[in-house]
């Protein structure tokens, strides 16, 4: 990954964290990694956990959540969520998979939080 692309992604994740905190969410974990992959942010509002994938673009998104969560990414995020939930049984509660889309263009940042961006296929 190029330096510029990584820097854009890092700015996007910081913007997502600020937005989610201002929206009342507690950040439980960031960049949780395991052999199955990574989840960008895990948040909790006291009743619901959300596993959040952050996507940052310097241009506009096409509005298709499928482009953020293709089926291969969905399977990976579900597997990582399963690992995280088994490692943190004390935090087990209702959960969902969200996306935060960051539009970062010429120093201006727009944040779009898509709750329940997809429904799990494997987790019950």
Image: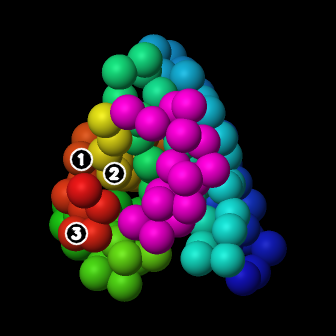
Q: Decide whether the magenta segment is chiefly helix, strand or loop.
A: helix
The residue carrying mark 1 is 116
Query: Would you say 63 lies left or right of 73 here?
Result: left
Spatial CA distance of label 2 from label 1 is 5 Å
Q: Residue at x 22, y 69 (%)?
A: 121
Numbered mark located on residue 121 in the image: 3
Q: Secondary structure at mark 2?
A: strand
Q: Quadrant of residue 63?
A: bottom left
Q: Position of residue 52 (x, y in %)?
A: 45, 49
Magenta span contains residue 10: no
Q: Is residue 84 magenta?
A: yes
Left or right side of 89 for 117: left
Span of residues in magenta: 77-93
Instruction: Kindly indicate whether the residue at mark 1 contacts the one at mark 2 (C-beta within 8 angstroms).
Output: yes
Please state the horizontal and vertical placement of residue 80, each as a whole percent of the image: 53, 65
Label 1, secondary structure: give it.
Answer: strand
Q: Which residue is mark 2?
A: 97
Front residue of this view, candidates 33 and 9: 33
Which of pointers 2 and 3 lies earlier in the amino acid sequence? 2
Taking the spot 37% from the left edge, 76% from the top edge, the residue there is 75
Q: CA distance from mark 2 to mark 3?
A: 11 Å
- Given residues 6 and 108, the one toward you in this image is 6
Q: Which label's residue is closer to the chain start, 3 or 1? A: 1
Residue 117 x/y as whole percent:
25, 54
Give the position of the N terminus as an image quadrant.
Answer: bottom right
Residue 8 drawn above or below residue 49: below
Residue at image location 33% in from the left, 51% down from the top: 97
């Amino acid at each position: 990954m190029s330096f510029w692309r990584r820097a854009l992604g890092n700015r996007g994740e910081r913007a997502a964290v600020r937005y989610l905190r201002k929206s009342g969410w507690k950040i439980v974990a960031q960049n949780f990694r395991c052999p199955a992959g990574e989840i960008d942010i895990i948040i909790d509002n006291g009743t619901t956990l959300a596993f959040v994938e952050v996507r940052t673009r310097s241009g506009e998104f096409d509005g298709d959540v499928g482009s953020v969560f293709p089926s291969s990414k969905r399977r990976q995020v579900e597997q990582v969520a399963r690992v995280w939930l088994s490692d943190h049984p004390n935090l087990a509660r209702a959960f969902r998979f969200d996306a935060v889309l960051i539009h970062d263009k010429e120093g201006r940042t727009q944040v779009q939080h898509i709750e329940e961006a997809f429904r799990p296929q494997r987790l019950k």
